[in-house]
Amino acid sequence: MQERIKSLLKKILPKKKRIRSKKGGNSAKGNRTAKSGKTRAKSSSNYPSYRAVYHGGFKSKIKRFILKATIYGTLAVALFLFILSLTLPNIDDLNKVKKAQSILIKSEDGQIIGSFGDIYGEYITYDEFPKSLSDAVIATEDRNFYHHFGVDPLGLVRATIANIRAGHVVQGGSTISQQVAKNVFLTPDRTIIRKLKEMLLAFKLESRFSKEEILSIYLNRVYLGAGSYGVDAAAKRYFDKSARDLNLGESAIMAGLLKAPSRYAPSSNPVLSRKRADQVLVNMEDAGYLNKQQTARARKELENSMKGRKPSSQSTFYFADWIADQLPEYIGNVDDDVVVTTTLNLNWQLAAEKSINEIMDKDGERLNASQAALVAMSPDGALRAMIGGRSYAESQYNRATQSQRQPGSSFKPFVYLAGLEEGMTPDTTMEDQPLSVRVAGGRWQPQNYNHRYNGAMTLKEALAESVNTIAVQISEEVGRDKVINMAHRLGISSDMQPLPSIALGATEVDLLELTNAYAHLAANGEIVYPYGISEIRTVHDKRLYKRPVPRQGRVLSENVVGMMNEMLMGVLTSGTGRGAQIGRPAAGKTGTTSDYKDAWFVGYTPDLVTGVWVGNDNNEPMKKVTGGTIPASIWRGFMSVALSGVPASGLPTDRSFFSALPWNDNAPEMSERPDETENPQTNTKPEKPPLELGESFWRKLQGVR
């Protein structure tokens, strides 16, 4: 084997120069011949040995290979980076913001409760920023900002060491220039190509813009939570001021948001926001921007700024979504950003959320009730609070406006109202007894909740105790069509069938329209349309919409309203709604569906109307939850807080002596519910039929006491 290797080496390696005799030269042929044997014998000495070649020539070849590989590799990387640089975006218009339309939704007192789209504030130059803000950002995000060329090698090494020690990523090595490149031009994908592009863009930014311009671009574009892009939008969102006016403590909060905007936003988590701001102040002191006295003063400033700040409620997003869905009807296509002022009372919203959480946390799991919704409105239809579910983060489905459920006995006021218009009174007496109604294919026999019968009862007593048999008797006597017409007149939009069971709520409604129907009683019979938008303006203060004066019209006569108030007040004082008593005059009605799948309580005072629904999304039955239990408790908890500063006033219960007579004044001005946008009719009160005295007159007269 060695011989073969030597033979191969002879062919590829150069021969050593032979040492020739000065004396012999070329003419000493004989001597050469004589020594030929010796020469041949020593011919191997003319070539390097195998060992020498192995240890010398092989090493030199490796060195040459490494050198070539380095050169070619460097050229290849340079070529790759050059080609990659050709794909980088243009940065000439970097300080020009292009964005989609944004919508800002505010409560009645101007607090932001929701936003859609990207919200940008005013573009602020470096010279206009408070020094405390730029110092806080640099101390926290990029301490070598003024000394590196776009990429900070020392920062990368420092971050790598910290991450290795921690066992996970605790520091990032990106500079502010790299963050501008990533935020403005690149996707958040964590790939080598994206990182290389980020570094190349950082170099390009450093060559094109000054450090001050780069910092200004960064602070005007960075996302800072709650849909806000740029420090000016965030300052207005969190502190209701321009970024030019931020103090040191507020600047620390803004700088702290850069790490995790949603986590550290003062609107959603004021405790974490303050802790993060404290760390920013420590960073500023370490970087030499603050001394100990300034840090202590800033902490005090921060404490005052955060004092009393409560986390914003995500429950407002249900209301904000409901508002956003209506906007096209009011403003059409508008390119400018818009600000919507609504009717929502944020304090009442928080009170509603608190009441639901307290009651449901206490009894919900035990009674297998997982969801609840609440709607509160003024008697004129202005939405004041809306809870669409237990958690918006878990489910954006709005159970107050989207969920269609059977109302159960909370539908009965429509039955009794139809009876009152036909001449019945709260004192009219009917017999609570077994009842059989002819239906297609047989007979239907409604049962009471307690499966007992009470004999003779007044309508007031029957409604207070939610007696089913008497509600069916009223519906059958006045006519099912009139019951359905009454429900439609008060805003129930469901397609109801004239079946005997309609008297017991055999239809589907949503909580908003049911609550709005009761609002007609709080409004003394005037027509009520629910609304949540007061005004819409552009960000440049151009008014696009202002709610007009609501149309006038009476859908219930004052006489009927007075009698209905009297009856529904009895529900709270002596009936199924006793758990909803709030220490002031109030009226309402409970509702429970078969198998306890839905439980309702809708009630009102002269100042506020509130409806509550409790149930499960999957229609699973609850454990004997009725409208007088969890829903009534939620209603009481909310109304007690909402009305705590409102003087108590009574509901009108006046009624005419002639209520039961044929010439009663029970007919409303509007027998049908007009669309809100229709022109009101000046004389829509229906003509009364000619007076006829017969059996019905004397029977009705018997009900007058």
Image (tube, grey):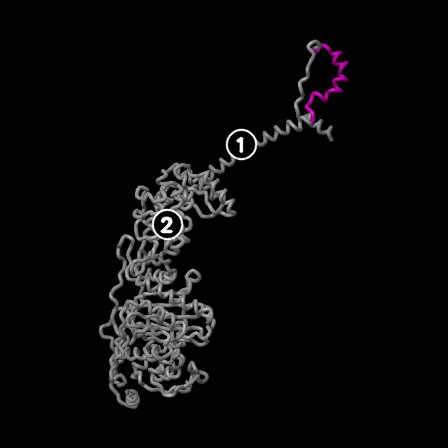
Q: Name the residue rendered at 71%, 29% in the picture.
A: 5
Neighbour class for label 2 at 10 Å: few (<14), some, many (≥20)?
many
Choose top left, top right, bottom left or bottom right for residue 110.
bottom left
Q: Could you tell me what secondary structure mostly forms the magenta stretch?
A: helix
Identify the secondary structure beneath mark 2: helix
Q: Which residue is mark 2?
A: 253
Q: Name the residue rendered at 30%, 51% in the picture.
A: 241
Answer above or below: position of 192 versus 621.
above
Amino acid identity at mark 2 = Ile
Tell me the tag on residue 133.
none
Choose top left, top right, bottom left or bottom right for residue 651.
bottom left
Q: Name the residue rendered at 76%, 15% in the picture.
A: 35
Tell me the tag on residue 71.
1
Give the farthest residue toward the top: 23
Question: In the rendered image, is residue 526 in sight?
Answer: no
Front: mark 1 or 2? 2
Q: Which residues are magenta?
A: 25-50
Identify the secondary structure beneath mark 1: helix
Q: Position of residue 150 (x, y in %)?
A: 42, 39
Q: Position of residue 265 (x, y in %)?
A: 38, 53
Q: Nearer the viewer, residue 604 or 288?
A: 288
Answer above or below: position of 141 versus 35.
below
- Asked if residue 402 is among those painted magenta in the image, a careful observer would answer no
Neighbour class for label 1 at 10 Å: few (<14), some, many (≥20)?
few
Amino acid identity at mark 1 = Ile
Nearest to N terminus: mark 1 or mark 2 = 1
Q: Position of residue 653 (x, y in %)?
A: 27, 78
- Which image quadrant: the C terminus? bottom left
Q: Position of residue 527 (x, y in %)?
A: 28, 72
